[in-house]
Image: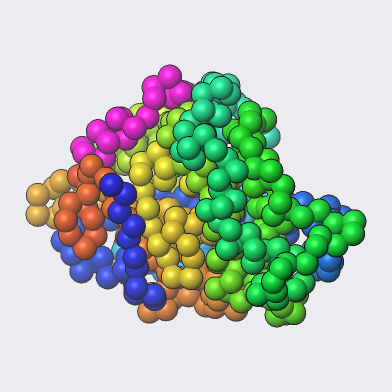
Amino acid sequence: MKTILMAACCVPFLWAQSTDNTQLKQVIIFGRHAVRTPNTPNSTLNNFSVLSYPNFSVPGVSVMTPNGQANETILGGYFRLWLTQEKLLTGNDAADNAFVYFRADGAPLIIGTAQAFAAGFLPAASVTINSTTTADPIFHPVDAGVAQLNEEMAVAAVNGRIGNNPQALATAYAAELALLRSVLFNYPVTTTPPPATPAGKLDVTAAPITVTAGTNSALPVNLGGLLTVATALDPFIMEYADGMATPDVAWGQLNAGGISQVFRLYDRVLDLEYRTPYLTSVQNSNLASHIVRTLLQGATGNSMGGALGTPSDKVIALHASNFNISGLAGLLDLDWLAPGYQADVAAPGGALVFELRQSQTTGEFIVRAAYIVQTMDQLRNRTPLTLNAPPAIAPVFIPGCSTHNATFDCPLESFVRVVGQQTNPRFVDLNN
């Protein structure tokens, strides 16, 4: 059974770990891109609403905003403080840079996010961001030809999770759809009966929900109207996190709690697309294999095929999209709950963190996992982060591996076994 782990707001969990008898040897930081402009132009979005969607401070689709960049640098600075306190970094950026490996998905948004994070993490160093102009096999294994997706199986696997009745999702999320419709068409949600669809507008909440074959690893299945719903509400969290004036955030109709509520629809899309067992096996076996081999390489000091970086690298920073983080979490059955967000949300800038630690008593290597994310208000206000005023941090239990303690320690040997059980070797390429 999945375990949802709650983290008390502003408890410096990782900072407090320095009081135990383990030494941090390596850390893998797997983060989502920063706050961005919508993925869809306003010319399309405006078909869904009676009021025009607001313009961000920068033009273009899927472009990191200045505030998004600033927040990512703030987050990088927090990791710098923490890892220096843990003695994994020395505070000498030029020296530390020799032991850091950065890799980002090739989209400009994500490369820019990695650069912004690095600017806070090693501000006095020139960090190399490894990326490729073609499909990166650890983030897009299907597009890169490493894994093969059976479209019929993908559709069946998703349908099997919803009773082979996609439209039933409209009933299950009726409250969220009603709230979204009232926001888009600018009327009180309590209005009975709801007003008719305004002339010339598309009611995204009434679009049929279907499950058909997708087009690529970013869209393994097509959820029909539910994807259109996600498109319509995607800008809201970015508007709030980017610090837009209150009247411009969902046209002044939603606060942070309301945004979180309607985002249950968006989160359900990610859950079906990327956490469905068959899909996550195809799309994340290669990534998971690289992560476990990187931890083994860090523990043994010996170069290993399929590992990221070199045996001497202490920090491995990966940046990709929320579907990558959700997919990896689904593969390993990881859950978290951070203040202000729904369960398992891969929020802007948030990161899954895997710590490789060694017991100073027994010499045993262990893995600890956590999800670290700036709260919506920390993003909105560009709140400085310190060890005493950290981001939200949720320790993550690793099923089949973690033990019953506050930090959910997982012996490295057990972590290797669990990852091996969850990955499909047919979808792993140790050269990429």
Would you say the magenta stretch is mainly helix, strand or loop? helix
Q: Is residue 307 left or right of residue 419?
A: right
- Return the x and y of residue 303 as percentages of the image width and height: 35, 31
Count of marks overlaid on the render: 0
Nearest the viewer among 19 and 264 is 264
Q: Is residue 72 left or right of residue 405?
A: right
Q: Which residues are magenta?
A: 412-432
Q: Is residue 260 left or right of residue 66?
A: left
- Return the x and y of residue 317 as percentages of the image width and height: 48, 49
- Return the x and y of residue 328 as percentages of the image width and height: 44, 42
* Coloring basis for residues: rainbow
Q: Residue at x 34, y 65 (%)?
A: 6
Q: Residue at x 34, y 32 (%)?
A: 422
Nearest the viewer among 347 and 133 is 347
* Residue 105 shows in this picture: no
Q: In which quadrant of the rendered view does residue 43 lie?
A: bottom right
Q: Residue at x 63, y 28 (%)?
A: 213
Above or below: residue 320 compared with residue 381? above
Task: Tell which residue pokes out farthest to the left in this image.
Answer: 361
Above or below: residue 89 compared with residue 214? below
Q: In which quadrant of the rendered view does residue 189 lie?
A: bottom right
* Residue 285 shows in this picture: yes
- Return the x and y of residue 101 as percentages of the image width and height: 48, 45
Give yes or no for residue 379 being in the magenta stretch: no
Nearest the viewer among 303 and 170 is 170
Q: Residue at x 42, y 45 (%)?
A: 329
Task: Tell which residue pokes out farthest to the front in this image.
Answer: 193
